[in-house]
Amino acid sequence: MTAITGINTAYGSKLERLGVRTVRDLLLYFPRRHQDFGSVMPIAWIRPGMRTTVRGRVYQVQRQFTPRKHMRIAKATISDDSGQLNVIWFNQPYIANYLHEGDQIFVAGEVDLNGGLLMKNPEYEKVSDDPSHSARIVPIYPETKGLTSRWLRPKIRPLLWLADQLEEVLPAELMQRRGFMSRPDAIRQVHFPDSLEILDDARSRFGFEEMFLNQVAVQQAKRARKAHAAHQIPFDKATARAFVAALPFKLTNAQRTAAWQILQDIARPEPMNRLLEGDVGSGKTVVAAMAIHHVAHVGLQSMLLAPTEILARQHAEVVEALLRPFGIVVGMLLGSTPAAARRALLASLADGSIDLLVGTHALIEEDVRFKQLALAVVDEQHRFGVVQRLSVRQGERWPHFLSMTATPIPRTLGLTLFGDLDISVLTEMPPGRLPVATRLVPPDERSAAYDFIRQQVVAGRQVFVICPVIQESDKLGVRSATQEAEKLQREVFPELAPRIALLHGRMKAAEKEGVMLKFQGGEVAILVSTSVVEVGIDIPNATVMMIEGAERFGLAQLHQFRGRIGRGVHESTCLLFTDMEDAETIRRLNAVVTHHSGFDLAEIDLKLRGMGELHGFRQHGNEFKMANLLDAALISDAQAEAVRLLDRDPTLAGEPALRRQLSAYRRVFALD
Ligand code: ADP
Ligand code: MG
């Protein structure tokens, strides 16, 4: 990178941190958005409420500090022939050094009225001879410390002609039929567009390209899977009936449908790849157990993988109780299983005398060998990563694969990121579950909330308190689990101090398990925790979920926290706290109060805040920069084109550029 004029080692390494190592990377480092400095409005014409661009001369620049709000601000007054405008920037004091009296600048932003016309935190740009920032539509790049758009623009612009060197990845026939802009042109237009319309065309070309790559990769994975053999487990009505008859309850319709879909899948010669999705408490375990039962019935083996030891123990206990009446042998393998016991377990696994092995990561170690593994069930698989998921496939035949999650996946995402998965959704809850009352608690009712919590504990119930960070220093002003635990012990509930415990991700696994066991046993009454507590632990006696700094969590994640309670016979309450008072935060959090479906909440979050907020998918956010993941038409278009191409050219022999792009893509997605 440093071979390029104007990029020294320091900047080179900053770029590298953004993943930019080559000219190619730089050309493909796309702007997040654009600012139109091309159409400028005279100051006399602007009105409060407008979003607009102004060009004028700086005639007063000041730097100030507001002691009360601890903010450093830069202020300037700008004038053109028609009037003057005040501008203010918060927490960007360096602007006061960058601008000088007499400078000609552009500012763009929303106009306010505050003793005169005022723009707060506008985009700004010195009028210069440099064509990268002059009066035109300029790119705004995703900025990280020390790398500004202002710095990037003149570096990228002279390199744009090199875009011609980048190969086209979309098939020529498709390009022509859909009339897409060529890749080099689209790259140039995405950085420095000639007009907003052309920018739109360029962006939608790349949006399509991203989605198309995804769909080709997904369709290839699907074809590869279907080409593999699996153990066929014939559907047997009597076996299914016997399982259902032995249950202490009646299956919900949703459970019955899901079980039926799964039993159909495992009867097929190719491996199942199904996701069983359902809110916490919707009863996924019993559905999985029904499939395990079917597998054991024909003498084949299953495994059930859980993300933590506590959950593995819980699963082993629950599933064993369901399967014991049928003489099905359940083993459990954990990281903490002693060596001798482990050896014995592995021996019974290899000779087929264990029908189901339940456990944690310990299950996917190299030397764990089944006699005939036909079904792998994974609870909350996205916590394991896809790579591990693949390594559970043993031997010549692939096991059927079932993953279970409480993370609601919006429908369009189900078609993209998880396009090779068939999805079953448990849309209803078992009957008799008490709904969890949810409240957004105003700051002045905090002590009343504490009184309520005290009453609950005195009545024998248990309480979760969730905080966004571990320690105060992590993020200024955000409530931390460590401090809150101390505060509750010292100030709020001194009488309960010994029964208040802390749980967070930096504790050792054994420590965490210890605390969870004490909470499960009732010894701990108030568990102050970070989000680590979220995975499916069942504490029926817990009736209060208090969440601090609720605005810092995704809505679907808040819903998952809420799912930790309301699992027993007592009425439960979820209390949301926030120190933010802006209308948008309040409106967003209120969605959790009014919506009781994790799916709805996930969709709302996807709309309001994008992928980043969808818990569990953060790592995928980067793969789609231009494509709108809520755009169902785009997805189905891209999918149709992918299928069409693979039907015509299954090995992509005629598309070398696309093949190269895909192999990079698959690495990122761990599809290989
Ligand atoms: P999750 O989907 O969160 O994993 P579980 O499988 O742990 O849910 O089930 C939650 C609880 O609901 C368990 O105690 C289970 O026995 C119970 N349950 C499951 N299905 C039903 C049903 N159809 N009727 C009544 N209770 C059920
Ligand atoms: Mg579960």
Image (cartoon, rainbow, N blue to C red):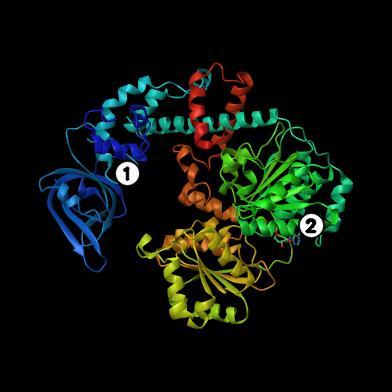
Q: Nearer the viewer, residue 352 or 127?
A: 352
Residue 380: horizontal and vertical position, in percent? 61, 50
> Which residue does the image show at 22% across and 67% down from the upper left?
67
Q: Is residue 631 left or right of residue 394?
A: left
Residue tagged by mark 1? 143
Q: Nearer the viewer, residue 299 or 343?
A: 343
Amino acid type of the residue that numbered disc 2 sits on in the rendered structure = Leu
> Which residue does the image show at 76% across and 56% down from the upper left?
320
Provide the secondary structure element on which disc 1 rests.
loop
Q: Whole-Å distance between the Cαs marked 2 and 1? A: 54 Å
Above or below, 569 relative to 234: below
> Which residue does the image show at 57% across and 73% down from the upper left?
524
Extreme residue in the top direction: 654
Residue 595: horizontal and vertical position, in percent? 58, 60
**Which quarter shows the C terminus?**
top right
Count of marks, rendered view: 2
Residue tagged by mark 2? 322
Q: Residues within 10 Å of mark 1 (few under 14, many from 20)?
A: some
